[in-house]
Image: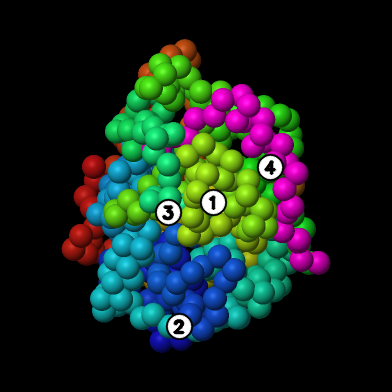
Amino acid sequence: MNSPVIVVGGGLAGCEAAWQCARYGIAVEVWEMRPTRSTPAHQTSGLAELVCSNSLKSESANTAPWLLKEEMRRVGSLLIQVAADCAIPAGHALAVDRTAFSSKVTERIGQEPLITIRREELTSLDEKQLTIVATGPLTSDALSEEIARRTGSSQLAFYDSISPIVEAESIDYSKVYFAARYEKGTPDYINCPMSKPDYDRFYDALVAAEPTQAKDWENLNYFEGCLPIEEIARRGRDTLRFGPMKPVGLQDPRTGRRPYAVVQLRQENLRADSYNLVGFQNHLKFQEQARVLRLIPGLENARFSRFGQIHRNTYINSPAILTSTLQMKNYPMFLFAGQICGVEGYVESIATGMLAGLYAAILTAGGTPMAPPRETAIGSLVHYITHADARSFQPANITFDLLPPLDRKIHDRQQRHRMQCDAALEQLGPWIAQLGRQRKRPAGLPQAC
Protein backbone atom coordinates (compact mmCIF):
# COMPACT_ATOMS: atom_id res chain seq x y z
CA MET A 1 0.00 0.00 0.00
CA ASN A 2 1.57 3.30 -1.12
CA SER A 3 -1.15 5.78 -0.13
CA PRO A 4 -2.38 7.10 3.21
CA VAL A 5 -5.92 5.94 2.38
CA ILE A 6 -7.21 2.79 0.67
CA VAL A 7 -10.71 2.66 -0.79
CA VAL A 8 -12.01 -0.82 -1.53
CA GLY A 9 -14.63 -0.71 -4.26
CA GLY A 10 -15.09 1.53 -7.30
CA GLY A 11 -18.83 1.95 -7.02
CA LEU A 12 -20.80 5.05 -6.08
CA ALA A 13 -19.63 5.27 -2.47
CA GLY A 14 -16.03 4.34 -3.25
CA CYS A 15 -15.63 6.90 -6.02
CA GLU A 16 -17.15 9.67 -3.90
CA ALA A 17 -14.95 8.73 -0.94
CA ALA A 18 -11.80 8.78 -3.08
CA TRP A 19 -12.72 12.14 -4.56
CA GLN A 20 -13.27 13.71 -1.15
CA CYS A 21 -9.86 12.48 0.03
CA ALA A 22 -8.21 13.97 -3.05
CA ARG A 23 -9.97 17.32 -2.48
CA TYR A 24 -8.20 17.48 0.87
CA GLY A 25 -4.88 16.77 -0.81
CA ILE A 26 -4.74 13.16 0.43
CA ALA A 27 -3.42 10.47 -1.92
CA VAL A 28 -5.72 7.46 -2.20
CA GLU A 29 -5.74 4.06 -3.88
CA VAL A 30 -9.02 2.68 -5.21
CA TRP A 31 -9.12 -1.10 -5.43
CA GLU A 32 -11.74 -2.34 -7.90
CA MET A 33 -11.81 -6.02 -8.79
CA ARG A 34 -13.67 -5.60 -12.10
CA PRO A 35 -12.90 -6.59 -14.83
CA THR A 36 -10.52 -9.14 -13.30
CA ARG A 37 -13.50 -10.48 -11.39
CA SER A 38 -17.05 -9.52 -12.27
CA THR A 39 -20.31 -9.90 -10.35
CA PRO A 40 -23.73 -11.34 -11.20
CA ALA A 41 -25.19 -7.83 -11.56
CA HIS A 42 -22.51 -5.68 -13.22
CA GLN A 43 -22.28 -5.53 -16.99
CA THR A 44 -19.24 -3.28 -17.47
CA SER A 45 -15.89 -2.52 -15.88
CA GLY A 46 -16.72 1.18 -15.50
CA LEU A 47 -16.61 2.91 -12.16
CA ALA A 48 -19.90 3.94 -10.51
CA GLU A 49 -21.98 1.60 -12.67
CA LEU A 50 -25.70 1.79 -11.87
CA VAL A 51 -26.93 -1.80 -11.81
CA CYS A 52 -30.57 -1.28 -10.84
CA SER A 53 -32.64 1.83 -11.50
CA ASN A 54 -31.23 4.93 -13.18
CA SER A 55 -33.11 7.28 -10.85
CA LEU A 56 -31.62 9.31 -8.00
CA LYS A 57 -35.13 10.09 -6.73
CA SER A 58 -37.11 13.28 -6.34
CA GLU A 59 -35.83 16.76 -7.05
CA SER A 60 -39.03 18.37 -5.77
CA ALA A 61 -38.09 20.96 -3.17
CA ASN A 62 -38.68 20.08 0.48
CA THR A 63 -38.84 16.33 -0.06
CA ALA A 64 -36.48 14.07 1.86
CA PRO A 65 -34.50 12.88 -1.23
CA TRP A 66 -34.17 16.49 -2.40
CA LEU A 67 -32.92 17.57 1.02
CA LEU A 68 -30.25 14.88 1.09
CA LYS A 69 -29.03 15.85 -2.38
CA GLU A 70 -29.13 19.56 -1.54
CA GLU A 71 -26.96 18.93 1.51
CA MET A 72 -24.53 16.95 -0.61
CA ARG A 73 -24.38 19.70 -3.22
CA ARG A 74 -23.48 22.19 -0.50
CA VAL A 75 -20.77 19.94 0.90
CA GLY A 76 -19.37 19.38 -2.59
CA SER A 77 -20.30 15.92 -3.87
CA LEU A 78 -18.68 14.97 -7.16
CA LEU A 79 -21.21 12.31 -8.09
CA ILE A 80 -24.26 14.50 -7.50
CA GLN A 81 -22.64 17.08 -9.78
CA VAL A 82 -21.99 14.44 -12.45
CA ALA A 83 -25.57 13.18 -12.10
CA ALA A 84 -26.85 16.68 -12.92
CA ASP A 85 -24.56 16.79 -15.96
CA CYS A 86 -25.90 13.43 -17.18
CA ALA A 87 -29.57 14.04 -16.32
CA ILE A 88 -32.34 12.87 -18.63
CA PRO A 89 -36.07 13.75 -18.58
CA ALA A 90 -37.82 12.04 -15.66
CA GLY A 91 -40.56 14.34 -14.43
CA HIS A 92 -39.72 15.59 -10.95
CA ALA A 93 -36.99 12.97 -10.43
CA LEU A 94 -33.25 13.16 -11.09
CA ALA A 95 -32.59 10.31 -13.51
CA VAL A 96 -29.38 9.83 -15.46
CA ASP A 97 -28.09 8.21 -18.61
CA ARG A 98 -26.36 5.35 -16.82
CA THR A 99 -23.68 4.85 -19.49
CA ALA A 100 -22.79 8.53 -19.64
CA PHE A 101 -22.81 8.77 -15.84
CA SER A 102 -20.40 5.88 -15.35
CA SER A 103 -18.14 7.09 -18.16
CA LYS A 104 -17.90 10.59 -16.74
CA VAL A 105 -17.20 9.40 -13.19
CA THR A 106 -14.56 7.00 -14.52
CA GLU A 107 -12.98 9.88 -16.45
CA ARG A 108 -13.00 12.31 -13.51
CA ILE A 109 -11.57 9.76 -11.05
CA GLY A 110 -8.98 8.55 -13.56
CA GLN A 111 -7.75 12.08 -14.27
CA GLU A 112 -7.25 13.01 -10.61
CA PRO A 113 -3.48 12.80 -9.95
CA LEU A 114 -3.93 11.94 -6.26
CA ILE A 115 -6.09 8.90 -7.06
CA THR A 116 -4.56 5.61 -8.19
CA ILE A 117 -6.90 2.93 -9.52
CA ARG A 118 -5.84 -0.68 -8.97
CA ARG A 119 -7.82 -3.28 -10.88
CA GLU A 120 -7.30 -6.00 -8.32
CA GLU A 121 -9.35 -7.84 -5.72
CA LEU A 122 -8.47 -6.98 -2.13
CA THR A 123 -9.13 -9.96 0.14
CA SER A 124 -7.64 -8.89 3.48
CA LEU A 125 -7.62 -5.76 5.62
CA ASP A 126 -4.56 -4.30 7.35
CA GLU A 127 -5.58 -2.83 10.70
CA LYS A 128 -2.71 -0.32 10.49
CA GLN A 129 -3.89 0.99 7.10
CA LEU A 130 -6.65 3.60 6.96
CA THR A 131 -9.20 1.83 4.78
CA ILE A 132 -12.67 2.68 3.50
CA VAL A 133 -14.67 -0.46 2.69
CA ALA A 134 -17.20 0.46 0.00
CA THR A 135 -17.61 -2.85 -1.76
CA GLY A 136 -21.38 -2.65 -1.95
CA PRO A 137 -23.97 -5.40 -1.91
CA LEU A 138 -21.86 -7.76 -4.03
CA THR A 139 -18.80 -7.92 -1.79
CA SER A 140 -16.65 -10.88 -2.84
CA ASP A 141 -16.76 -14.05 -0.77
CA ALA A 142 -13.13 -13.68 0.33
CA LEU A 143 -13.55 -10.11 1.57
CA SER A 144 -16.93 -10.97 3.14
CA GLU A 145 -15.19 -13.66 5.18
CA GLU A 146 -12.48 -11.17 6.20
CA ILE A 147 -15.09 -8.61 7.28
CA ALA A 148 -17.01 -11.27 9.20
CA ARG A 149 -13.80 -12.24 10.97
CA ARG A 150 -13.09 -8.62 11.87
CA THR A 151 -16.60 -7.85 13.03
CA GLY A 152 -16.81 -10.97 15.13
CA SER A 153 -20.30 -11.67 13.87
CA SER A 154 -21.92 -13.17 10.80
CA GLN A 155 -22.69 -11.00 7.84
CA LEU A 156 -26.30 -10.09 7.28
CA ALA A 157 -27.61 -10.61 3.77
CA PHE A 158 -30.79 -9.94 1.87
CA TYR A 159 -31.61 -10.12 -1.82
CA ASP A 160 -32.06 -7.12 -4.08
CA SER A 161 -33.61 -7.06 -7.53
CA ILE A 162 -33.14 -5.48 -10.96
CA SER A 163 -36.01 -4.23 -13.15
CA PRO A 164 -36.40 -5.22 -16.83
CA ILE A 165 -35.60 -2.78 -19.65
CA VAL A 166 -37.62 -2.63 -22.88
CA GLU A 167 -36.58 -1.19 -26.25
CA ALA A 168 -38.52 2.00 -27.00
CA GLU A 169 -39.21 1.07 -30.63
CA SER A 170 -41.05 -2.07 -29.56
CA ILE A 171 -43.66 -0.19 -27.49
CA ASP A 172 -47.14 0.23 -29.02
CA TYR A 173 -47.66 3.95 -28.40
CA SER A 174 -51.31 3.80 -29.44
CA LYS A 175 -52.08 2.04 -26.15
CA VAL A 176 -50.01 4.17 -23.73
CA TYR A 177 -49.76 7.80 -22.68
CA PHE A 178 -47.12 10.14 -21.27
CA ALA A 179 -47.74 11.61 -17.81
CA ALA A 180 -46.17 12.30 -14.44
CA ARG A 181 -48.01 11.35 -11.27
CA TYR A 182 -50.21 14.23 -10.07
CA GLU A 183 -48.72 16.21 -13.00
CA LYS A 184 -45.59 16.87 -10.93
CA GLY A 185 -42.74 17.83 -13.21
CA THR A 186 -42.80 17.17 -16.94
CA PRO A 187 -44.79 14.23 -18.39
CA ASP A 188 -41.78 12.01 -19.08
CA TYR A 189 -43.09 8.62 -17.93
CA ILE A 190 -44.80 6.22 -20.31
CA ASN A 191 -47.94 4.87 -18.66
CA CYS A 192 -49.46 1.54 -19.66
CA PRO A 193 -53.10 1.65 -18.46
CA MET A 194 -54.94 -1.52 -17.44
CA SER A 195 -58.63 -2.26 -17.19
CA LYS A 196 -59.82 -4.74 -14.58
CA PRO A 197 -59.83 -7.64 -17.09
CA ASP A 198 -56.30 -6.63 -18.18
CA TYR A 199 -55.14 -6.57 -14.58
CA ASP A 200 -56.77 -9.89 -13.66
CA ARG A 201 -55.18 -11.62 -16.65
CA PHE A 202 -51.76 -10.16 -15.81
CA TYR A 203 -52.06 -10.96 -12.10
CA ASP A 204 -53.02 -14.60 -12.68
CA ALA A 205 -50.13 -15.11 -15.09
CA LEU A 206 -47.66 -13.41 -12.73
CA VAL A 207 -48.40 -15.47 -9.64
CA ALA A 208 -48.37 -18.67 -11.69
CA ALA A 209 -45.10 -17.91 -13.50
CA GLU A 210 -42.11 -20.16 -12.92
CA PRO A 211 -39.41 -18.58 -10.75
CA THR A 212 -35.67 -18.88 -11.19
CA GLN A 213 -34.39 -21.71 -9.06
CA ALA A 214 -32.46 -20.51 -6.05
CA LYS A 215 -28.99 -21.88 -5.56
CA ASP A 216 -28.46 -24.18 -2.62
CA TRP A 217 -26.61 -21.52 -0.62
CA GLU A 218 -29.24 -18.85 -1.20
CA ASN A 219 -31.60 -17.79 1.54
CA LEU A 220 -34.09 -15.49 -0.14
CA ASN A 221 -34.47 -12.95 2.64
CA TYR A 222 -35.76 -10.03 0.56
CA PHE A 223 -35.45 -6.42 1.63
CA GLU A 224 -38.97 -5.10 2.26
CA GLY A 225 -38.24 -1.89 0.39
CA CYS A 226 -37.37 -3.69 -2.86
CA LEU A 227 -39.53 -6.81 -3.09
CA PRO A 228 -39.82 -8.72 -6.37
CA ILE A 229 -43.14 -7.95 -7.99
CA GLU A 230 -44.35 -11.54 -7.75
CA GLU A 231 -43.69 -11.48 -4.00
CA ILE A 232 -45.82 -8.35 -3.66
CA ALA A 233 -48.58 -9.98 -5.71
CA ARG A 234 -48.71 -13.04 -3.47
CA ARG A 235 -49.61 -10.82 -0.51
CA GLY A 236 -53.02 -10.12 -1.98
CA ARG A 237 -54.78 -9.60 -5.27
CA ASP A 238 -54.83 -5.80 -4.97
CA THR A 239 -51.41 -5.22 -3.41
CA LEU A 240 -49.88 -4.30 -6.78
CA ARG A 241 -52.61 -1.69 -7.30
CA PHE A 242 -51.54 -0.05 -4.04
CA GLY A 243 -47.85 -0.48 -4.84
CA PRO A 244 -45.87 -0.27 -8.10
CA MET A 245 -49.03 -0.36 -10.24
CA LYS A 246 -51.08 2.22 -8.36
CA PRO A 247 -53.05 4.44 -10.78
CA VAL A 248 -53.54 7.35 -8.36
CA GLY A 249 -52.58 10.68 -9.94
CA LEU A 250 -52.26 9.18 -13.43
CA GLN A 251 -55.49 10.10 -15.21
CA ASP A 252 -55.58 8.92 -18.82
CA PRO A 253 -55.95 12.07 -20.98
CA ARG A 254 -57.65 10.06 -23.72
CA THR A 255 -60.51 8.89 -21.51
CA GLY A 256 -60.47 11.46 -18.72
CA ARG A 257 -60.60 8.60 -16.21
CA ARG A 258 -58.16 6.90 -13.90
CA PRO A 259 -57.19 3.38 -15.07
CA TYR A 260 -57.73 0.35 -12.87
CA ALA A 261 -53.95 -0.13 -12.69
CA VAL A 262 -50.90 1.40 -14.39
CA VAL A 263 -47.42 0.19 -15.30
CA GLN A 264 -44.94 3.07 -15.57
CA LEU A 265 -41.88 3.09 -17.84
CA ARG A 266 -38.98 5.46 -17.15
CA GLN A 267 -36.49 6.65 -19.77
CA GLU A 268 -33.10 4.95 -19.51
CA ASN A 269 -30.79 7.26 -21.47
CA LEU A 270 -30.54 10.52 -23.40
CA ARG A 271 -31.29 8.75 -26.67
CA ALA A 272 -34.63 7.62 -25.20
CA ASP A 273 -34.20 4.30 -26.99
CA SER A 274 -34.99 2.20 -23.93
CA TYR A 275 -37.23 2.33 -20.85
CA ASN A 276 -37.20 0.43 -17.57
CA LEU A 277 -40.35 -0.94 -15.95
CA VAL A 278 -40.56 1.01 -12.69
CA GLY A 279 -40.81 -1.26 -9.66
CA PHE A 280 -40.92 -4.45 -11.75
CA GLN A 281 -37.90 -6.22 -10.27
CA ASN A 282 -38.59 -9.94 -10.22
CA HIS A 283 -37.18 -13.44 -9.74
CA LEU A 284 -38.74 -15.18 -12.74
CA LYS A 285 -37.14 -17.17 -15.53
CA PHE A 286 -36.40 -14.99 -18.54
CA GLN A 287 -38.86 -16.75 -20.85
CA GLU A 288 -41.55 -16.40 -18.18
CA GLN A 289 -40.80 -12.70 -17.84
CA ALA A 290 -41.22 -12.18 -21.57
CA ARG A 291 -44.54 -14.05 -21.57
CA VAL A 292 -46.01 -12.26 -18.55
CA LEU A 293 -44.75 -8.75 -19.29
CA ARG A 294 -46.12 -8.88 -22.84
CA LEU A 295 -49.59 -9.05 -21.28
CA ILE A 296 -49.15 -5.39 -20.32
CA PRO A 297 -51.03 -3.10 -22.76
CA GLY A 298 -48.53 -1.53 -25.13
CA LEU A 299 -45.89 -4.21 -24.52
CA GLU A 300 -47.46 -7.03 -26.52
CA ASN A 301 -44.49 -7.05 -28.92
CA ALA A 302 -41.90 -5.75 -26.50
CA ARG A 303 -38.22 -6.50 -27.03
CA PHE A 304 -36.25 -6.64 -23.78
CA SER A 305 -32.64 -5.48 -23.63
CA ARG A 306 -32.43 -6.69 -20.03
CA PHE A 307 -34.64 -8.95 -17.94
CA GLY A 308 -35.17 -8.63 -14.22
CA GLN A 309 -32.99 -10.63 -11.88
CA ILE A 310 -31.99 -11.15 -8.25
CA HIS A 311 -28.56 -10.53 -6.80
CA ARG A 312 -27.07 -10.89 -3.37
CA ASN A 313 -27.00 -7.79 -1.22
CA THR A 314 -24.74 -8.02 1.81
CA TYR A 315 -24.48 -5.52 4.63
CA ILE A 316 -23.00 -5.36 8.10
CA ASN A 317 -24.94 -4.94 11.33
CA SER A 318 -23.85 -1.31 11.61
CA PRO A 319 -25.52 -0.41 14.93
CA ALA A 320 -23.41 -3.05 16.64
CA ILE A 321 -20.24 -2.42 14.64
CA LEU A 322 -19.85 1.24 13.62
CA THR A 323 -19.41 4.55 15.42
CA SER A 324 -21.26 7.70 14.38
CA THR A 325 -18.30 8.55 12.13
CA LEU A 326 -18.59 5.25 10.20
CA GLN A 327 -15.49 3.77 11.88
CA MET A 328 -15.44 0.26 13.25
CA LYS A 329 -15.60 0.30 17.03
CA ASN A 330 -12.92 -2.36 17.36
CA TYR A 331 -10.83 -1.24 14.38
CA PRO A 332 -11.07 2.56 14.01
CA MET A 333 -8.78 2.51 10.97
CA PHE A 334 -11.59 0.82 9.02
CA LEU A 335 -14.51 2.91 7.76
CA PHE A 336 -17.55 1.58 5.92
CA ALA A 337 -19.61 3.36 3.27
CA GLY A 338 -22.34 2.59 0.78
CA GLN A 339 -24.84 -0.23 0.85
CA ILE A 340 -22.57 -2.51 2.83
CA CYS A 341 -23.00 -0.19 5.83
CA GLY A 342 -26.76 -0.49 5.74
CA VAL A 343 -28.11 2.32 3.61
CA GLU A 344 -30.41 1.62 0.70
CA GLY A 345 -30.34 3.70 -2.48
CA TYR A 346 -27.90 5.43 -4.80
CA VAL A 347 -27.99 8.85 -3.16
CA GLU A 348 -27.70 7.37 0.32
CA SER A 349 -24.68 5.34 -0.78
CA ILE A 350 -22.98 8.39 -2.28
CA ALA A 351 -23.72 10.36 0.90
CA THR A 352 -21.99 7.85 3.17
CA GLY A 353 -19.09 7.64 0.72
CA MET A 354 -18.76 11.41 0.87
CA LEU A 355 -18.67 11.31 4.67
CA ALA A 356 -16.21 8.43 4.83
CA GLY A 357 -13.87 10.23 2.44
CA LEU A 358 -14.02 13.43 4.47
CA TYR A 359 -13.47 11.53 7.72
CA ALA A 360 -10.51 9.62 6.29
CA ALA A 361 -8.91 12.86 5.08
CA ILE A 362 -9.41 14.47 8.49
CA LEU A 363 -7.97 11.43 10.29
CA THR A 364 -4.95 11.45 7.97
CA ALA A 365 -4.37 15.09 8.85
CA GLY A 366 -4.49 14.25 12.56
CA GLY A 367 -7.94 15.74 13.12
CA THR A 368 -11.02 14.36 14.82
CA PRO A 369 -14.02 13.84 12.54
CA MET A 370 -17.40 15.05 13.70
CA ALA A 371 -20.71 13.56 12.63
CA PRO A 372 -23.14 15.86 10.79
CA PRO A 373 -25.87 17.51 12.88
CA ARG A 374 -28.75 15.23 13.75
CA GLU A 375 -31.19 17.75 12.23
CA THR A 376 -29.73 17.20 8.74
CA ALA A 377 -30.80 14.46 6.37
CA ILE A 378 -27.28 13.07 6.13
CA GLY A 379 -26.86 13.23 9.90
CA SER A 380 -30.16 11.47 10.50
CA LEU A 381 -29.33 8.76 7.97
CA VAL A 382 -26.03 7.98 9.67
CA HIS A 383 -27.65 8.22 13.09
CA TYR A 384 -30.14 5.56 12.04
CA ILE A 385 -27.59 3.06 10.76
CA THR A 386 -25.39 3.50 13.83
CA HIS A 387 -28.11 3.71 16.51
CA ALA A 388 -30.95 1.46 15.32
CA ASP A 389 -31.86 -1.71 17.19
CA ALA A 390 -29.09 -4.14 16.22
CA ARG A 391 -31.44 -7.08 16.74
CA SER A 392 -33.78 -6.04 13.94
CA PHE A 393 -31.62 -3.80 11.78
CA GLN A 394 -32.60 -3.36 8.12
CA PRO A 395 -31.24 -0.91 5.53
CA ALA A 396 -33.00 2.42 5.13
CA ASN A 397 -33.64 5.06 2.51
CA ILE A 398 -33.77 8.69 3.54
CA THR A 399 -37.24 9.69 4.79
CA PHE A 400 -38.52 12.41 7.07
CA ASP A 401 -39.21 9.68 9.62
CA LEU A 402 -35.45 9.50 10.25
CA LEU A 403 -35.20 13.21 11.06
CA PRO A 404 -35.90 14.42 14.60
CA PRO A 405 -39.35 15.99 15.11
CA LEU A 406 -39.73 19.74 15.29
CA ASP A 407 -39.95 21.35 18.71
CA ARG A 408 -43.61 22.16 18.06
CA LYS A 409 -46.40 20.25 16.41
CA ILE A 410 -47.19 21.27 12.82
CA HIS A 411 -50.28 19.58 11.40
CA ASP A 412 -49.79 20.60 7.78
CA ARG A 413 -47.37 18.05 6.38
CA GLN A 414 -45.96 20.24 3.61
CA GLN A 415 -45.30 23.07 6.04
CA ARG A 416 -43.72 20.62 8.50
CA HIS A 417 -41.41 19.21 5.85
CA ARG A 418 -40.46 22.67 4.67
CA MET A 419 -39.57 23.68 8.22
CA GLN A 420 -37.52 20.50 8.67
CA CYS A 421 -35.61 21.25 5.47
CA ASP A 422 -34.97 24.82 6.55
CA ALA A 423 -33.70 23.64 9.94
CA ALA A 424 -31.46 21.02 8.32
CA LEU A 425 -29.81 23.44 5.92
CA GLU A 426 -29.36 26.01 8.69
CA GLN A 427 -27.53 23.44 10.82
CA LEU A 428 -25.45 22.22 7.87
CA GLY A 429 -23.56 25.50 7.43
CA PRO A 430 -21.63 25.45 10.72
CA TRP A 431 -20.74 21.80 10.18
CA ILE A 432 -19.28 22.60 6.75
CA ALA A 433 -17.29 25.40 8.35
CA GLN A 434 -16.02 22.90 10.92
CA LEU A 435 -14.75 20.69 8.08
CA GLY A 436 -12.73 23.61 6.74
CA ARG A 437 -11.15 24.21 10.13
CA GLN A 438 -9.93 20.62 10.47
CA ARG A 439 -6.99 21.62 8.32
CA LYS A 440 -6.07 24.36 5.88
CA ARG A 441 -8.96 24.61 3.46
CA PRO A 442 -7.92 23.40 -0.01
CA ALA A 443 -9.26 24.94 -3.19
CA GLY A 444 -12.82 23.92 -3.85
CA LEU A 445 -13.86 23.11 -0.28
CA PRO A 446 -17.15 24.95 0.21
CA GLN A 447 -17.48 27.78 2.66
CA ALA A 448 -20.25 27.71 5.24
CA CYS A 449 -23.61 28.14 3.56
Q: What element carries label 1?
A: loop
Q: Is tag 4's residue or tag 1's residue first in the polypeptide sequence?
A: 1
Which residue is the site of mark 2? 119
Q: Do the residues labelled 2 and 3 touch (CB within 8 Å)?
A: no
Picture quadrant of residue 359: bottom left
Identity, as a three-letter code, of the amino acid under mark 3:
Glu
In this image, 114 relative to 329: left or right?
left
Q: Residues within 10 Å of mark 2 (few under 14, many from 20)?
A: some
Residue type at mark 4 is: Leu
Q: Residue at x 48, y 59 (%)?
A: 305
Q: Please name the residue shown 50% across and 44% down the image.
A: 299
Q: Magenta includes 203?
A: yes
Residue 194 located left or right of residue 354 = right
Q: Work out whether mark 4 precedes mark 3 in sequence or the reverse, and give the earlier one.
A: 3
* Residue visible at 61% across and 24% down in the picture: 196
Quick one: label 1 or label 2, which is nearer the N terminus?
2
Above or below 351: residue 203: above
Residue annotated with mark 1: 163
User: What residue is at 35 percent from the left and 25 percent from the top?
Assistant: 183
Q: Callout 3: 10 Å neighbours few (<14), some, many (20+)? A: some
First in sequence, mark 2 or 4: give its number: 2
List the residue tagged with mark 4: 206
Q: Residue 167 got which mark?
A: 3
Image quadrant containing the C terminus? top left
